Amino acid sequence: MELKKYKMKDIVTFLNGRAYLMPELQDKGKYRILRVGNLSGGNDSWYYSDMELDENKYCENGDLLYAWACTFGPHLWKEEKVIYHYHVWKLIEKKERVDKIYLYYYLLYQTPLYLGGVNGATMVHITKQNMEKKTVYVPASLPTQQKIASILSAYDRLIENNTRRIRLLEQMAENLYKEWFVRFRFPEHEKVEMVNGLPKGWKINSLKEICEFKRGRNITSAEMCDGIIQVISAGVAPSGYHNKANVHGVSVTMSSSGANAGYISIHYDDIWAADCSYISEKETEDIYYVYELLNNIRQVINNFQIGAAQPHVYPKDINRIKTCVPPKELRIKANTNLSKIHKEIHKLYKQNQLLTHQRDLLLPRLMSGKLEVKS
């Protein structure tokens, strides 16, 4: 495969997003403001703006973006028109030299190498000037680039399809919980008398009656290793790996400190619970019901954050939250139905892990030309 040498600025133009002052960030408006956290999946909250800006300050479905601060890497935007923030570049490829989808995968491959030259102490970032000067080797033939992009895209389409199915299943589980335990339309609810606004036999008590959060055991970075057990800490993603687990089976974790304090997550495999609190199916026989319950009171849990500089959520406080306590047999019945949904979600997650691994094995071989393709 013939490769052609360029400087990055010869094949792509980097457009900066807009920097915002806090008063300009609205709770509602005409356009969403796309920030790095929204791209990476670490932040589900959005700011909005009614400002009408130059067209190069918006991105639309199909645009190629690059996060250059805090988290790094390319993204293909697949939603409606939004304003992109200053810490995101929009990339305009020179079509006669590079295919946009190929460029996306090239940047996905190269970004870990670029991180060796990042700048900044309080906020790590890649500079536009350094990016433009980087040397790039791409197939001279556009059809070859497109073929490589097509091979890799096939994996991502399968991953996206599975991800959509996961979201639908998550919605099904949430709807089942709300139907039974919020709207009180559980099986044979017509036969149950309402007393003081609750079905007879239900009561209000502390969360501890249903489940009890326990503190995890911290682990230093030196203790982490190349094991397969995820170390769950204060973030929304694994903070590392270990070769031992301290929580076995299905579990639910709650981040204890940091910006994500109070974040609830479910894990289908063994984990090492570090700077988080956890509930395990070993002690809680209706774990899927418990997860949906905690999902339903996320905002209540967030209200228990303590501390300004470093927010904390303590399990002793969460265990005391007052909640509706249905009869155990109904919780177990719901858990049986929810387990079927969550087991399908787990299967799809596993498929996506395998597809991602296969794609990531192909990526360097295709980009380097070690695995040659015919256009």
Image (cartoon, rainbow, N blue to C red):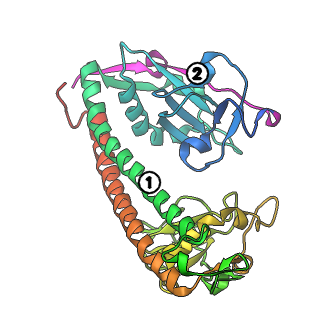
What residue would you read off at disc 1?
168
Type of residue at label 1?
Leu
Residue at (47% x, 69% y) in the render:
267
Find residue 325 and name its label.
none
* Helix, strand or loop under label 1: helix
Residue 185 covered by magenta stretch: no
Q: Quadrant of the C terminus?
A: top left
What residue would you read off at disc 2?
15
Residue at (54% x, 76% y) in the render:
189
Q: Quadrant of the N terminus?
A: top left
Type of residue at label 2?
Leu
Along the line of sight, the residue nearer the viewer: 87 or 167 = 167
Along the line of sight, the residue nearer the viewer: 104 or 280 = 280
Residue 21 covered by magenta stretch: yes
Residue at (60% x, 83% y) in the render:
210
Does residue 146 appear to the left or right of 281 in the view shown?
left
Q: Which of marks 2 and 1 is nearer the N terminus?
A: 2
* Residue at the farthest left position: 374
Q: Nearer the viewer, mark 2 or mark 1?
A: 1
* Residue at the farthest top position: 96
- Magenta-highlighted residues: 1-23
Question: Can residue 315 be seen by looking at this rendering?
Answer: yes
Does residue 39 appear to the left or right of 229 in the view shown?
right
**Which quadrant of the figure has residue 38?**
top right
Q: Where is residue 69 in the image (x, y as percent from the top left)?
A: 62, 39
* Helix, strand or loop under label 2: strand
